[in-house]
Image: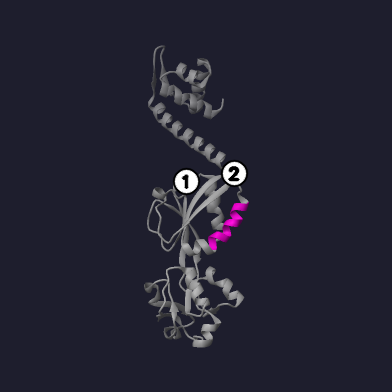
């Protein structure tokens, strides 16, 4: 007899109070139900039930074995569901939130590849630098920059958020090219916010150099800072994915390419109970593949 089938009959016999009731629930004969329990007892070398003509009682071992059977059957059922989910094609609408600049410049080009791979999935992307509450706002995944606070969310790390320092050829022709990090303090430096403008940290052969910088323009949008740099308004410190196309085209010049700049962690986070969803799992796995 199949061991799992025998465990199911035994659990039903305990919960319904008799072998005949377990037999009815299992659509088998009472004799067959009794055979299942006797098979278990023979396998274990222990009695599970004290049976009389009118009632049954669990033995001490039978009580412990009942709890173990319940747990085993639960795990088997969950595994079966997980296997079925893995076989399902990702489908349905997926709601995602991401930071503005990363979402527009890095995530959007990648979505063309993802949607081609998974034609039954549609994606609703909300771009905002605000940290959204996944539960309250109904998002299934979020891309976040920086150190993550302790939470119930599951995080998968992506490649760190790498930065570049650039300026336009026109600006450098007018103001000169900084040769040492300290030279940045004499230039117009563009910034996302006044707080981000205070010091820029560069690491070279001589160690870490923290340079006080200043500038007359701050804009709370990475793409706007890129445009300002392209128009010769100053030196910009922004993510590499935002600037490297302009560097390759000669519209911007990378400064201090041999120096290391601080990078920030980049992660995709999601609620632990949502990962069984094929659409979410496919999306997370794609991001790890694409941005690692």
- Image quadrant holding the N terminus, namely top right
Which is nearer the eye, 158 or 213?
Answer: 213
**Residue 148 at x, y percent in the picture:** 40, 59
Stretch of the chain drawn in magenta: 106-116
Q: Residue at x 49, y 47 (%)?
A: 275
Q: Tell me where residue 189 sits by quadrant.
A: bottom left
**Residue 153 at x, y percent in the picture:** 42, 52
Residue at which label 1 appears:
274
Mark pair 1, 2: CA separation: 16 Å
Q: Residue at x 45, y 18 (%)?
A: 21
Placement of 74 over or under 193, stated as above or below: above
Q: Tell me where residue 51 sits by quadrant.
A: top left
Q: Are marks 1 and 2 in contact (CB under 8 Å)?
A: no
Answer yes or no: is residue 176 visible. Answer: no
Q: Is residue 96 magenta?
A: no
Number of numbered discs: 2
Q: Tell me where residue 218 sits by quadrant.
A: bottom left
Residue at which label 2 appears:
89
């Amino acid at each position: 007899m199949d061991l799992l089938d025998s465990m199911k009959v035994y659990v039903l016999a305990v919960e319904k109070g008799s072998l005949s009731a377990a037999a009815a629930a299992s659509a088998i004969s009472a004799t067959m139900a009794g055979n299942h329990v006797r098979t278990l007892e023979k396998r274990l070398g222990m009695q599970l039930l004290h049976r009389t003509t009118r009632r049954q009682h669990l033995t001490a071992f039978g009580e412990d074995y009942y709890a173990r059977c319940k747990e085993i059957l639960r795990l088997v059922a969950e595994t079966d569901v997980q296997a079925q989910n893995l076989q399902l094609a990702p489908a349905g609408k997926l709601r995602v939130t991401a930071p503005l600049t990363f979402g527009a410049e890095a995530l959007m080009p990648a979505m063309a590849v993802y949607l081609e791979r998974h034609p039954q999935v549609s994606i609703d992307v909300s771009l905002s630098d605000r940290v959204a509450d996944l539960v309250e706002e109904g998002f299934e995944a979020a891309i976040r920059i920086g150190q993550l606070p302790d939470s119930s969310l599951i995080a998968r790390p992506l490649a760190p958020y790498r930065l570049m320092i650039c300026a336009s050829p026109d600006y450098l022709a007018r103001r000169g090219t900084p040769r040492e990090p300290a030279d940045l303090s004499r230039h117009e430096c563009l910034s996302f916010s006044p707080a981000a403008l205070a010091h820029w940290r560069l690491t070279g052969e001589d160690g870490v150099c923290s340079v006080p910088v200043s500038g007359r323009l701050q804009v709370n949008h990475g793409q706007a800072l890129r445009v300002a740099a392209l128009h010769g308004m100053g030196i910009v410190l922004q993510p590499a994915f935002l600037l490297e196309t302009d560097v390759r085209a000669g519209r911007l010049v990378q400064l201090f390419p041999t120096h290391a700049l601080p990078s920030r962690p980049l992660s995709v986070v999601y609620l632990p109970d949502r990962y069984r969803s094929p659409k979410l799992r496919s999306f997370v796995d794609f991001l790890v593949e694409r941005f690692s």
